[in-house]
Amino acid sequence: MQRKLAAILAADVVGYSRLIAEDEARTLDALRALRRESFEPLVAEHRGEVVKRMGDGWLVAFASVVDAAACAIAVQERLAGHDRIKLRIGVHLGDIVHEDEDIYGDGVNIAARLQEVAEPGGILISGTAHESLIGRLDEKFEDAGERSLKNIRRPVRVCFWKGRASDSSQTDEPSDHKGMLAAEKPSIAVLPFDNMSGDAEQEYFADGISEDVITDLSKVSGLTVIARNSSFAYKAKSIDIRQVCRELGVLYVLEGSVRKGGNRVRINAQLIDGSDGSHVWADRFDRHLEDIFAVQDDVTRKIVEALQVALTPMEKVRRSYRRSVDPQAYDLMMRARSHIYGFTREGLRVARDQLGQAIVIDPNFAIAFAWRAIVSAVEYFNDWTDREPHPLDAGLADAEKACALDPNEPHGHYARGLVMIWRRDLDAALAAEDRAIELDPNMAGAYAARGNVLDFSGHPERAIDSLKHALRLDPGYDIALQFLGRAQFSCQRYDEAAETFRQRLQLSPRSDVTRVFLASAYGLTGRLDEALRIWAELQQINPKFEVGHLANVYPYRDENWLENLTNGLRLAGVLEVPE
């Protein structure tokens, strides 16, 4: 064996499995071009040696840390603005062993762990590597303190790359990046539980149990929990747990199965270490449906114990008040949620009816009132209702009923915040979303709504921080990308906004509102041909769309927002200038 000191660079493609699933041919072509035209030529230019090529990553050895860090920066700068591929990169200086044309050792392990927790498009280097950069590339990195890395015995001091715009307000790094890196909270994703009932129509029930476990875990402030939207992207797919952990940025995955028979439910669950696929904990729960909240509480408690997470005193108090629920009302609520996630006018109507039935059966069912309030807010914004009372009046009544029945139910406050946004009471909306986050520190929807409120209130920079945190908790949260793009647009960061809107269209390809803002951003940056193309797509998707609808609905305090939007559309030649 040959042992030596080396600088190791580990790089990995962000969201590789999702990209392959969306468009395999395009993704593979982009990776081949990246390998041939960018990554490996830059490695050679900086005197590095590609030791290992994976389908979605590389392991590279350098004799110099300066070369390794400079190469990492060059790669990320070359990829900035790429419409498909982003990399995470980790760099460490340490002892390695050459054997069988491969390398091993702590130097490799730490570089790989740093890569796993780096931001998409970002670079993390160890403190050891950073010390060798002092006086050379030192100003490019910022110390983020010590970080516990999985299967690394001692905490590692880490530093992150500040990016090309590090000295301006247009940096891609959220203001709380340093705090997020330094945090030592275990992170977890809950995959959709398998339906073992032998009845395909019971799929909604297994999904509902999975979602409730996510909600219960996310109320624990000592955990980072990925939201339902992103973890459910893996439903019915053959997956590699380690790949899931890399893509979602978590250390652990919970998976399991649900079997419902009559008024009884059996849940099997297992907690898996994403680094090596080993089981941390597994158990089976067999209870009456009336005790379903108690079952979810048991699952959360077992995970908290397995990960040695301490509950705060207030979390202990809140968890001690767990009521029973009527099985029929609970079933109706879960059926309603499955329709809400379909996001259609008819689906929301069905959901409203089912939630109403659940409330008749159990008039104290706070979460049912909260979900009905959310339906009202969505119906209002999309102009999907002609019923009485007005959806915002009905939504406010339901949200306040939910909060009165259970002040510790975060969805009630979240729903009240959504309704207050469209009622143009932005101060009340912000207070409601802050309370929801206090009760559920991992509620991506509340962080996204909070960002929306801050943008409407004239604080787009603060909105960007909140929205980036929402996307950390829910990387596939497409509407949060639209909110983020709008906030960047409000800051006149039009190139960044355009990139964010393009990402949103990859997840929601038929969005008309996103195309309006993207066309305007292109107009304001002189990309007129692209603006015309986007506008033509908008006319095909929704030929009746009117910019005036946004002016009637969006509660911006700064009246100049509409002038800015329409100015970009006029410059693009897609909106006539009134005489």
Image: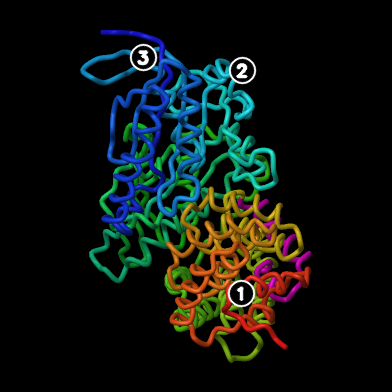
Residue type beneath disc 1:
Leu
CB within 8 Å, label 3 to label 1: no
Quarter of the image for residue 495 reads bottom right
In the rendered image, the vertical position of residue 70 relative to residue 78, given as above or below: above
**Distance between mark 3 and mark 1 Cα atoms:** 56 Å
Residue 134: numbered disc: 2
Q: Is residue 444 magenta?
A: no
CB within 8 Å, label 2 to label 1: no
Give the mark nearest the N terminus, 2 or 3.
Answer: 3
Residue type beneath disc 2:
Ile
| Disc 2 crowd, CA 10 A, few/some/many (<14, 14-19, 20+) | few
Residue 565 x/y as whole percent = 66, 71
Rendered residue at 66%/58% (across/down): 451
Residue 569: numbered disc: 1
Magenta residues, as a range? 416-440
Q: Is residue 475 left or right of residue 16?
A: right
| Disc 3 crowd, CA 10 A, few/some/many (<14, 14-19, 20+) | many
Residue 170 x/y as whole percent = 65, 47
Residue 380 seen: yes
Task: Report the magenta stretch's main SS.
Answer: helix
Give the mark nearest the N terminus, 2 or 1.
Answer: 2
Q: From the viewer's perspective, is the residue at label 3 or at label 1 nearer? A: 1
Residue nearest the viewer, comparing 266 with 257:
257
The quadrant of the image that shows the N terminus is: top left
